Amino acid sequence: MTLLINLLAIIAIVLMLLLLTRRLQNGRTIPLRPLTGYTALAGQLGRAIESGRRLHVSLGRATLAGAANPTSIAASNVLDRLAQDGCANATPPLTTVGEGTLLPLAQASVRRACDDVGRPGDFEAATVQFIATDTDPFAYAAGVTATLQQNRIASNVLVGRFGLEVAIMAEAASRQEMEQVIGTDDPVALALATAATSNVLIGEELFVASAYLEGRANQLASVQLQDILRWLIILTILGLSVYQLVT
Amino acid sequence: MRLKRGIPVVIAVFFGVLTLVGLLVPLPEISNLLLSWGGFLAAVALILGVLNLFTVHITRLFRERNPYSGILVFSMLAVAALAVTDSAAVNLTENGVGSVFNLVQAPLEAAVASLLAFFLLFAGFRLLQRQRNIWSVLFILTAVLILSSNALINSALLPAGASLVFSQMRNTIQDIFVTAGIRGILIGVALGIVMLSIRMLIGLERPYNK
């Protein structure tokens, strides 16, 4: 029975996603509410280019071989966009990762961006750096802090799965008066991030990065479907609460 | 070109659906096999990461004469040498790598972790400077309350009555407000993960096709 319910739910979500994608491809549009994190990203990139300094992007420490894979995929969507814009201006973002499987993903992202704009020579080995494994969060924080201090960095973008160590990284960037954008799905890290910067991507806001930064029909449809499912969950919770109160 | 871009999509969708079937049905043999492949790839990726770390820092050592890179390169080589001498084949040292970890790395990580409370308070005060509104004040007050209540509740500095009040306030904040907030965030995260995962399963999201 559980198998049937799960299968039906997955099929229903897929069908709805395809239906909403088709509607958007046929010309319908959906408004996206402004998110300060994504608005800030555009401004930070421009200021970095003008000042001749680089963006630093860190993708967190969630392995692609684990359950937190989607968090890292969402973070890599942010890197894709920043890499494209950075490489077009001969300043590819300095990228650090806290887990081994994220290294080839980040390297492919930045290398592809450099190739697309016809500047393959801008990609160097040091452009994407592995700092520490996911089991050493404070070593990761120390490595990122050193990277921020030893390079000419204009803005600090931390997107992906972080833990308590985000406080150390954010503090290091704040001391150097860098603008920051922090996006993570960990509630503890979010609390620390909120203290460090106003440009925070809270939980699900990280997973809509592709819709905000690229805006293809299937990505926008995904955001719309997420909103619909969220309302369904809210109504279910309220309904069950009222039912529990009454009975 | 289309074939070159299509093959990774087919592979990803096939193995994604296979993993889903293995988890739904359930067929632990399939799930375990694919998970073991994933673990093996993660281990190989770790080796690549270590090589990347070494390459970046040895380049920085010789090109920029960076002393910190020199210390890192030396440490990597020293621990690698210790791992060789610890091995049964060589057997020159006993638990050398473990000793380095216990005497060097663990204390350093503990020292960095111990600074977290100070970082949080500094960040909080900087938040007050950056935006002076009721939410910033509430953030600081809550952080100070939780930190001080954890420290004072079981100490002799507070009378029993005050200790009880502090404890109840802390439990109310943690059990009601914090739990509610975290659950809301996690529900949203779960929705985001479901949507992104389904897009990857049906080939709409292709992070591997760069």
Image: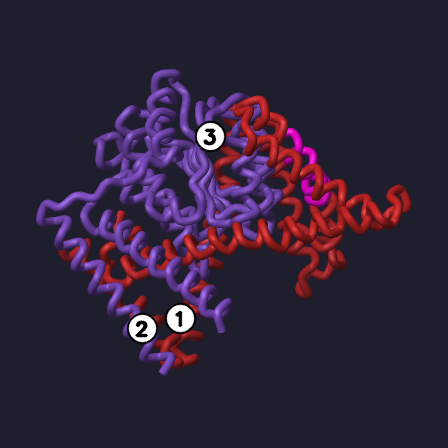
Chain colours: A purple, B red
Kind of residue at badge 3: Gln
Q: Nearer the viewer, mark 1 or mark 3?
A: 3
* Residue designated by label 2: B18
Q: CA distance from mark 2 to mark 1?
A: 9 Å
* Residue labelled with disc 3: A180
Compare residues B4 and B140 and report the one nearer the observer: B140
| Residue B114 lies in the magenta-colored region | yes
Instruction: Examine the rendering and report whether any part of residue A22 can be seen.
Output: yes
Q: What residue span does the magenta drawing correspond to? A: B108-122
Task: Identify the mark at residue B34; answer none if there is no mark.
Answer: 1
Q: Residue furthest left?
A: A26
Query: What's the residue at 55%, 44% (across, down)?
Result: A189
Please report whichever mark, 2 or 1, sits nearer to the chain's N-terminal start. Answer: 2
Q: Quadrant of residue A175?
A: top right
Decide: few, some or many residues near mark 2? Use Cα within 10 Å; few <14, some 14-19, many ≥20: some
Q: Residue furthest front?
A: A246
Q: Position of residue A6 (x, y in %)?
A: 34, 74
User: Residue B178 versus residue A154: which sits nearer the camera?
Assistant: B178
Q: Which secondary structure, mark 2?
A: helix
Q: Chain of mark 3?
A: A
Residue B71: x %, y % from top left = 64, 34
Q: Amino acid at mark 1?
A: Leu
* B89 is higher (above) or lower (below) than A75: below
Q: Which label sits in the foreground, 2 or 1?
A: 2
Q: How many marks?
A: 3
